[in-house]
Amino acid sequence: MQCPRCRRTQPPEYAGRGSCVHCGQFLAGGIDWVAWPPGGYQVRGPRRTPRYTGPPSYPVPPRWGFPLVTWRRSTSIEPVPATARQRARSLAGTAQPLLWLAAGTSLLGAAAEVWRYLLLLDSRADALPAGRLRLSDALVTTGGVVSLAACALAGLVTLLWVLRAVPASAELAAARPARSTRELLLGWLVPGLNLFVPGSTLAEIEHAVLRRPAGERPRPSALLRAWWTAWVAGCLLVVLTLLWSLRGSTQAQADGVLLHALTDLVAATTAVLTVLVVRTLTGLMQPARPGRSRRMVVVKVYDDEDGSAGDRQRGQAADHELRPPRRLAGQPQPG
């Protein structure tokens, strides 16, 4: 073994020593380390599982355990009730998918009615196959039932959203709602009243969420006027279609197919416009997010001293493009 300090080889007769015979450096290679457990090395046999002798018995009833009190919470926190705006936002998230479903099923019903009318035109010259007629009847019946159910469910959730949006908008405007819940229900469900009350109610909600003066007359936006027009047209078409179905002539039945298709198209349009109205008004009810930091972007660089424009460099800003004013003659050039 060679010493790591003096680099000398140890004599063979001193091979078992733990230090160098020349310089006294500790030599770890000459020692064998043996680890023993505490208490000495003992040989243990296989562990045996004790036999079950029954539950433990005590000479006296034990005094340990949980206290004999009723269960209670560790901290008492009063639940915070949801505000009208939060409920309106939740109902808007539920109403929008249902409205899209109503629009899709109404379009499918309109397509089935148009196909039936085309089959009626073809049947004037020749007989039609029975399979095509049965398929058309199945599509018309299925589309009518599914679209009616989807429109009814979407209308119910939308009406619930209106009932929550009215007090939420009144709270934002620091005013009292113009109509009670009973008046809203009667205005949306009673025929005749539902031609005027829904549009005026949404106009009042829009007027309130835009923070316009309370004494000013509500002026509906273009989106709301389009929705009101589609809503009134749909209600009138439903009544006209029901009355037209009472006629029994062949031409009246053919015209009824076109009326059903037109009613489905107007229903799909109304559902899409309702999605836009609900989304817009719900977004206006929510508190504004804190503004993000805006950064300036260089859009023009001046190279010479007389103020002529050099190469134009344009960039995309996070929110908007900020154009610096033109530099006047004699003004120091920005760095």
Image (cartoon, helix red, strand yellow):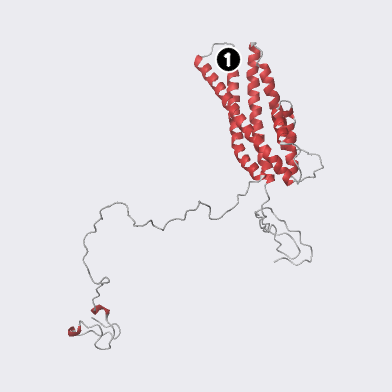
User: Does residue 277 appear in this view?
Assistant: no
| Outermost residue toward the right in this view | 215
- Please state the horizontal and vertical placement of residue 53, each as a whole percent of the image: 27, 52
> Considering only vertical position in the picture, is 237 above or below 16?
above
| Outermost residue toward the front in this view | 60
Placement of the C terminus among the 4 image quadrants: bottom right
Relative depth, front residue between 285 and 187: 187
Label 1 residue SS: helix
| Outermost residue toward the left in this view | 13
Q: Is residue 131 left or right of residue 281?
A: left
Q: Quadrant of residue 256?
A: top right
Q: Quadrant of residue 176?
A: top right
> Considering only vertical position in the picture, is 178 above or below 310?
above
> Considering only vertical position in the picture, is 255 above or below 222?
above
- Please state the horizontal and vertical placement of residue 266, each as a whole percent of the image: 66, 28
The residue that label 1 is drawn on is: 122
Q: Is residue 194 left or right of residue 99?
A: right
- Please state the horizontal and vertical placement of residue 66, each as a whole percent of the image: 45, 55
User: Does residue 244 appear in this view?
Assistant: yes
- Residue for point 58% across, 15% down: 122
Q: Amino acid at mark 1?
A: Asp
| Outermost residue toward the bottom in this view | 22
- Residue for point 63% across, 15% down: 254
Q: How many marks?
A: 1
Placement of the N terminus among the 4 image quadrants: bottom left
- Residue for point 69% across, 45% down: 285
- Please state the horizontal and vertical placement of residue 214, each as a whole percent of the image: 80, 43
Relative depth, front residue between 44 and 231: 44
